[in-house]
Amino acid sequence: MDDAEAARVAADPRYHELVRRRGLFTWTLTAVMLIAYLSFILLIAFDKALLARPIGAGVTSVGIVAGFAVIMLAIVLTAIYVRRAARDFDPLVEAVRAEHDA
């Protein structure tokens, strides 16, 4: 892609809409992950007793479950992003690219 073609794509209003929507979505997912992770870290720092509390017959603790939940949240948020990108963002990228390739 040369500079003139890049300038044409950058001037396309659909490209600006794509960048805005994708940015808002990714920052929202980032905020959710940061809140979950920082909450977990703050629990480790300030309430170790809660995290050490056994669950059920004492096989595992609240901390293990909370840590696993943070890992699973990351996987779920990644899946949400991939699904949304494939459904909403990729078709828009292809439409802008096809118009400017012609």
Image (spheres, grey):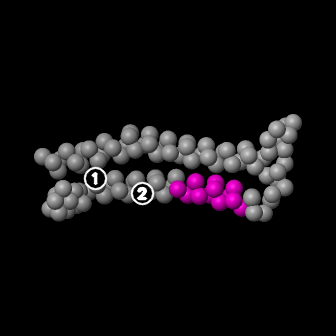
Q: Quadrant of residue 32?
A: bottom right
Q: CA distance from mark 1 to mark 2?
A: 14 Å
Amino acid type of the residue that numbered disc 1 sits on in the rendered structure: Arg
Q: What residue does disc 1 label?
A: 14
Magenta span contains residue 93: no
Image side of residue 9 versus residue 55, left or right: left
Image side of residue 2 versus residue 71, left or right: left
Question: In front here: 44 or 86?
Answer: 44
The residue located at (52%, 52%) in the rendering is 29
Q: What residue does disc 2 label?
A: 23
Question: In front here: 85 or 24?
Answer: 85
State if disc 2 and disc 1 touch (CB < 8 Å). Answer: no
Write down the region rendered in magenta.
30-42
Which residue is farthest right?
57
Q: Where's residue 39, x and y in %? A: 68, 58
The residue located at (75%, 63%) in the rendering is 45
Amino acid type of the residue that numbered disc 2 sits on in the rendered structure: Gly
Q: Where's residue 85, x and y in %? A: 40, 44
Label 2 element class: helix
